[in-house]
Amino acid sequence: MTFPKFPTRRAFFAGGAAALASPALGQVVGGGEYATPFENSTEVERDPNETARRNISSFRSLDWRPYFDNTRNGAILVDIDSRALHFWSEDQSVYRLYPTSVPLTEDLTRRGRTSVVQKVENPTWRPTPSMKERNPEWPDVVEGGAPDNPLGVRALYLSWTYYRIHGTHDTRKIGRRSSNGCIGLYNEHILELFDLSQVGTQVLLI
């Protein structure tokens, strides 16, 4: 796979700061407020205005039964085509529907069953070895809580290596094919999902 040449960290983040004013999208559902070669997960270099296509798929509520045998520990369904994340609580009293960013290409997309194995507040971002090989000028680390951290304010680590459901400060990415593997949410949505989910929550990507 051929990757284009990307701007430096300073140039990218300077341009990305303007996107912070973009509005978030939530949906009221069920009484709530808001309704390998897979190591190239969250990257910081792509400009969504140039490389990503807007979501033209449906964005609608779903029932958990066609996808899970039960909702033990809660259940998360990520619909890649619709670019939407669905959450059901264990007792099914809480349902949430969030818009997401999804992987840029099928080569970077992983589907199947996994689970939340770790919950991290203000996660630290580190480039994978392949990211660093392609972009040696990138920082070795972006500390958690930094305004330019690609993982946003919270991250749910999945059992698949390098895969996360996380926030993003670059709100242009939501609703688009714009990531290199991970699933991104608006920061205000990952804050809510972080509190609702737990280690052991079931996750299915379709």
Image (cartoon, rainbow, N blue to C red):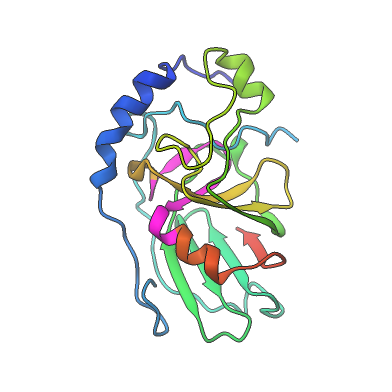
Residue drawn where x is 39% and y is 85% of the image: 31
State left or right for residue 153 relative to residue 131.
Answer: left
Residue 63 is inside the magenta segment: no
Residue 32 rendering spot, x and y as whole percentages: 40, 79
Q: Residue at x 59, y 66 (%)?
A: 76
* Along the line of sight, the residue nearer the viewer: 140 or 82: 140
Left or right: where 24 falls relative to 102: left
Q: Is residue 148 above or below residue 157?
A: above
Residue 135 image position (x, y, % from top left): 55, 15
Q: Quadrant of residue 131?
A: top right
x 42%, y 84%: residue:
30
In the rendered image, the quadrant that contains the N terminus is top right
Tell me where residue 126 sits by quadrant: top right
Instruction: Give the image location of residue 115, x and y in percent.
Output: 70, 60
Q: Per the image, is 175 magenta? A: yes
- The answer to which image quadrant residue 163 occupies is top right
Residues shaded magenta: 174-189
Count of number-bearing discs: 0
Residue in the image at 58% along x and 65% along y: 77
The C terminus: image quadrant: bottom right
Q: Residue 117: x percent and y percent?
A: 72, 57
Residue 127 vs 151, above or below: the answer is above
Front-lying residue, 185 or 204: 185
130 to the left or right of 92? right
Q: Is 175 displayed left or right of 20 in the figure?
A: right
Location of residue 39 with respect to 60 vertically, above or below:
above
